[in-house]
């Protein structure tokens, strides 16, 4: 009887832990080209205007000061990105940009 109670307690505990763990967010990335950038001032978000890889479907992203930005694998500032740079923008589940990786040849 004690073994059955212990087994049941562990099973219940396992289910509680499994169901109460936070759901891992899945970041999503998309590639494109820089059209323009505007550096944020006084802690305001900056702005990145980009297209898809083919130079179509122009859209804008708010870029917070906490976003990790790289250029050719090295840390960079938003203002260092130039028109035509190839970029990969990564967003979280709330569509907030978490990273921008740019490449310039």
Image (cartoon, grey):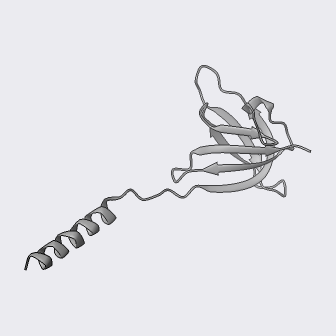
| Up/down of 2 relative to 59, above or below | below
Residue 19 x, y percent position in the rendering? 31, 64
Q: Residue furthest top?
A: 42
Q: Quadrant of residue 98?
A: top right
Name the image quarter holding the N terminus.
bottom left
**Residue in the foreground of this view, choosing between 92 and 4:** 4
Residue 34 x, y percent position in the rendering? 80, 43
Q: Residue at x 58, y 55 (%)?
A: 27
Judge left or right: residue 6 versus residue 65. left
Q: Residue at x 74, y 45 (%)?
A: 101
Judge left or right: residue 90 versus residue 10. right
Residue 102 x, y percent position in the rendering? 78, 44
Q: Residue furthest right?
A: 105
Judge left or right: residue 99 versus residue 12. right
Q: In which quarter of the image is residue 73?
A: top right
Q: In which quarter of the image is residue 13?
A: bottom left
**Residue in the foreground of this view, choosing between 33 and 71:** 71
Disc tally is: 0
Q: Residue at x 81, y 42 (%)?
A: 35
Judge left or right: residue 47 versus residue 54. left
Residue 80 x, y percent position in the rendering? 80, 31
Name the image quarter holding the C terminus.
top right
């Amino acid at each position: 009887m004690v073994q059955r109670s212990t087994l049941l307690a562990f099973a219940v505990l396992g289910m509680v832990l499994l169901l109460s763990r936070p759901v891992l967010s899945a970041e999503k990335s998309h590639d494109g080209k820089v059209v323009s950038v505007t550096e944020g001032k006084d802690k305001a978000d900056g702005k990145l205007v980009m297209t898809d890889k083919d130079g179509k479907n122009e859209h804008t992203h708010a870029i917070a000061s906490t976003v990790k930005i790289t250029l050719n694998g090295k840390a960079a500032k938003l203002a260092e990105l130039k028109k035509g740079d190839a970029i990969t923008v990564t967003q979280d589940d709330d569509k907030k940009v978490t990273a921008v990786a740019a490449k310039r040849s």
